[in-house]
Image: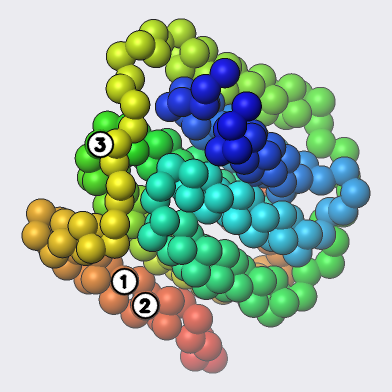
Amino acid sequence: MSLPDLLFYLLAALTLGSGLLVVANPFSRSPVTSAMFLVLTLVGLAGLFVLLHAFFLAAIQILVYAGAIMVLFLFVMMLLDLQEEERRRISRFALATGVLLAGGLGGVLVGAVVGTPAEAVPPPTLEAHAVDLGRLLFTDYVLPFEMLSVLLLVAMVGVILLSRKEPE
Amino acid sequence: MQVGLEHYLVVSMLLFALGLLGVLLRRNVLLVFMSLELMLNAANLALVAFSRYSGRLDGQMLVFFIITVAAAEVAVGLALIAALFRRRHTVHPEQLTLLRH
């Protein structure tokens, strides 16, 4: 087994394992623990991006996701000062339905991927340099880019409005 | 076995199913929100893998946009959760029954 393949299996295990611990951690009910494991999942995904030769996206993933978005999550958690989610019984029906639904969806998706003949896929050739990405962003994708800037402005104004203290 | 496109897709699909499980089962709005992030990231992985194996950069551009929209979504969602907590002192969606009565 070559080194990239070995790394793939390691990173996939890290990603899926810590993803599972985000959703269902048997040791802790604290949301902060889940957030930490989500950071680990994002780092694992960034590693997978590197294996897919998407170096710039891997950097963005770490900087924006693991850096900015997760810090925002943690800030809000500290702000809310949550006590631990009480360990109440999830109803058997809800648990069975949830596991059945998620497992069914996962099974169908994985089955579709595995069942598709693989010969059609040529070996990868793409090298995504930041220069090419930037050029594409400001030529073919300039309209979505501008719309996105408006979206960010709207979100910013909305957040300020939401977090304002209400008048008595 | 040589790692190919389908390996990445399987990881992505499993991660998506995990996120769905979290959305369905967890009882804390913050954790439901984190599970949504998990699902978005699963989609990102599939897009990057498709981009690499199809030789086009469009998939990676889409991931850019998804990350940006996710950042906006997180900001608005967390502001909503904070406002909710300020008024109702709970982050448990089953205690929000105002519209039921």
Residue A78 image offset from top left, x and y in percent: 72, 77
Q: How many marks?
A: 3
Q: Secondary structure at mark 2?
A: helix
- Residue underneath mark 2: A156
Q: Amino acid at mark 2?
A: Met
| Category of crowding for the residue at label 1, using alpha-carbon neighbours closer than 10 angstroms: few (below 14), some (14–19), many (at least 20) | some
Task: Measure how far apart labels 2 and 1 are at the Cα level.
Answer: 6 Å
Residue A52 in sight? yes
- Residue underneath mark 1: A152
- Which residue occupies 42% across, 56% down? A55
- Which residue occupies 29% across, 41% down? A126
Task: Measure how far apart labels 2 and 3 are at the Cα level.
Answer: 36 Å
Task: Measure how far apart labels 3 and 1 are at the Cα level.
Answer: 30 Å
Q: Nearer the viewer, mark 2 or mark 3?
A: 3
Q: Amino acid at mark 1?
A: Leu
| Category of crowding for the residue at label 3, using alpha-carbon neighbours closer than 10 angstroms: few (below 14), some (14–19), many (at least 20) | some
Q: Chain of mark 3?
A: B
Which quadrant would the C terminus of chain A be assigned to in this image? bottom right
- Same chain? Circles 2 and 1: yes
Q: Compared to A136, does B48 lie above or below?
A: above
Q: Chain of mark 2?
A: A
Q: Are marks 2 and 3 in contact (CB under 8 Å)?
A: no
Q: Compared to A107, does A149 lie above or below?
A: below
Relative horizontal placement of residue B33, taking residue B50 as reference (left or right): right
Residue B30 in sight? no
Q: Secondary structure at mark 3?
A: loop
Q: Amino acid at mark 3?
A: Gly
- Which residue occupies 64% across, 77% down? A75
Q: Are marks 2 and 1 in contact (CB under 8 Å)?
A: yes
Q: Secondary structure at mark 1?
A: helix
- Residue underneath mark 3: B55
Which sits in the foreground, A168 or A115? A115
